[in-house]
Image (cartoon, rainbow, N blue to C red):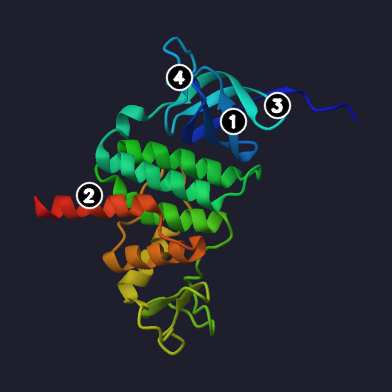
Amino acid sequence: MPAPSRTYKTRAIVLRARNLGEADKIYTLFSEESGKLDAVAKGVRRANSRLAGRLEFMCESLLGMHRGRNLDVVTSADVVTACWTGIVDPAAFATAHLIAELVDAFCEPDLALPEVYALLRGAVRGIAAAEDPARLIPRFELLLLGALGYAPEAERCVSCGEPLEGCPAWADLEAGGLACERCRPHAADGHPLDAADGANFRALGAARGGPLRPAAHATGAVARAVDAFVTYHLGKRPKAGRVLDELARAGAQR
C-alpha cells in the first residue's frame, strides 16, 4: 500500500490560535475531513505574511497542508467564508468564542465529525446575521450535544418512559434527559420546566437546515436547563459563558 501523500487540502474553521516563537502561530482548527487538529503557520505574524488575513478567528478557509512529524504545517489558505465583520460586536464575539470553546472542549482530535462541522459553519453565519446572537446559544448547545451522542431525552420521561408532551418536566442531568413529576430528581438544584418550557426545549433540539437560527427563543428556564446539561457533560462551565453573563448584566443596567 502506498504511503499517504505528505501534502493535502482541507476545509477548516479557525477555533483559536497561540503564538509560537518569534513569527509563527499554532492554530486549533476544526476541519471538514479530520475534525479538530492543531497546525502551525510559519511566519504568519510577519507583516508581509499572506496567510494572516486568511486565518482569522472563525474564518473558514481551504487550506493547503503539509504533514509534519509533530504538527502539520499550513502552506496556503483561500478564504471560503469570512464573517469577521459580523462578529466584531462584543456580544457576537463572545457568542462566537463560546461555541468555539464548546467545540474545542467536546471534540477529540483527529475524529471526523461532519455533522459538527456543518453545525459550526451554520452557527458562525447565524451569529454574524443575528441581532441578538446570544439567543442562538441554547439551540446550538442542544444540537451539539445531539451530534456528539449526548442529546437529552425530551419526548418521554428518561426514567419511566411516559410521554412528556403537555406535562411539566424536570431536567435530570445524571439520567440524561427530562423526567416526569413522579420521577423528578429531588436535588435542591433541580431545573423545573412547565409544559410550555418542555415544548420549547423540544423545538430547540429539532433538526435544522442552513445557517443556525433559533426554532424558538429559549425561555429563561430552558436556557438554564440546557446550560446545566452542557456544564454536566463538560465538567465545568465554559469561560466564555461568564463573559456573556457580564454583558447581559451590563445591558440590563443601561
Q: Quadrant of residue 93?
A: top left
Q: Residue furthest toward the left?
A: 254
Q: Residue at x 42, y 52 (%)?
A: 140
Where is mark 2, residue-wise? 247
* Residue closer to the observer: 138 or 104: 104
Q: Earlier in the sequence, mark 3 or mark 2?
A: 3
Whether residue 225 appears in this view of the structure is yes
Please report contact status of discs 1 and 2: CB closer than 8 Å, yes or no: no
Whether residue 206 appears in this view of the structure is no
Q: Residue at x 39, y 62 (%)?
A: 227
Mark 2 element type: helix
Q: Quadrant of the N terminus?
A: top right
* Residue type beneath disc 2: Leu
Where is mark 4, residue-wise? 45
Residue 146 located left or right of residue 130: right
Q: Nearer the viewer, mark 2 or mark 4?
A: 4
